[in-house]
Amino acid sequence: MRFPLPGKNALAGASLLLAAGCASTHPGTATEAHDPLEPMNRAVFEFNRVTDRVILKPLSSVYITVVPEAPRQGVSNVMRNLREPWVFINDLLQFKLDRAGATLGRFIINSTVGVAGLFKVSDEVGIPYHSEDFGQTLATWGIGDGPYLVLPLLGPSNGRDAFGFAANVYADPVSLTLEEIDDSKKFFDLSMTRTAIEAFDARVRLHTTLDELYKEDDPYVVARSVYWQRRRFEIYDGNPPEPEEDIFDMLEEEQAAIDAEEAQPENKQ
């Protein structure tokens, strides 16, 4: 069974999400995630939380206990290296030629000297890793966030990034290379194995972070805020602008200050 390409319904849904993103504010002008679907998002968040506590956390705990840190780090390094061709493409789509050159050099060094990415040799020679995906590319093209979304098992996202995730899945060079394998059953197995390993590796790396998150009074709000801030940080390459304050909020604050001043009794001489 060949990995299915998106059908008309999937493309229509993705188009609607992208349209919603176009109608939203640019990530530099929003002060927080736009969450009109909060009741639905909270329900999905709770589903993800229960699934994590019942299934993923126990598996992650056993893996961390049984497998030493060095092999675990090696798996993370290989997964990161496999993402590099897609990072390179998105660097180019964003016209970030210097970063594209760094990505290409990093991929070559880690794939050769680093033994297929098992070791992060690039970090030692001064080529730090940076992440780029199609959601970030759309943002640099002026596409707004769209509504905040919590996706089943995948977690926080938004209209633009959900569309970008679909592109990540179907346009990633590693996936396309696997598709060229004649044995379609093997392709399906390889693709699913890679996806499962990458997802599980991400869960392992977030093991402590998720424990802390679920201890919060309202972990949903915390996760939403962290996601929004992280995406802005990534989109602006670590230098996000200060959010523009809404003009009506500014007027309300000024009026409140005036009212407070007028309410003060006159100083007695």
Image: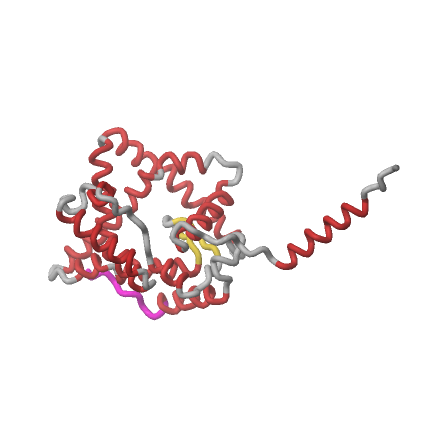
On screen, residue 231 versus residue 76, left or right, reads: right
Of residues 95 and 183, the one drawn nearer to the viewer in this rendering: 95
Magenta extent? 1-9
Give the vertical position of 257 relative to 6 (above or below). Answer: above
| Colour scheme shown | secondary structure
In the rendering, at what x and y percent does residue 234 appear? Answer: 39, 52
- Where is residue 63, by image quadrant? top left
Give the vertical position of 206 relative to 187 (above or below). Answer: above
- Where is residue 52, by image quadrant? top left
Visible in this render: residue 44? no
Image quarter hosting the C terminus = top right
In the rendering, at what x and y percent does residue 227 appear? Answer: 44, 48
Residue at the left extreme of this rendering: 182
Residue drawn 19% across the image and 43% down it: 121
Residue 8 lies within the magenta run: yes
Residue 42 lies within the magenta run: no
On screen, residue 187 versus residue 165, left or right, reads: left
Residue at the front extreme of this rendering: 269
Classified by dominant secondary structure, the portion drawn in magenta counts as loop
How many circles with numbers are drawn on the protein? 0
Image quarter hosting the N terminus = bottom left
Of residues 35 and 127, the one drawn nearer to the viewer in this rendering: 127
Residue at the right extreme of this rendering: 269
Visible in this render: residue 106? yes
In the rendering, at what x and y percent does residue 2 appear? Answer: 20, 61
On screen, residue 106 versus residue 12, left or right, reads: left
In the rendering, at what x and y percent does residue 148 appear? Answer: 47, 55
Residue drawn 22% across the image and 43% down it: 125
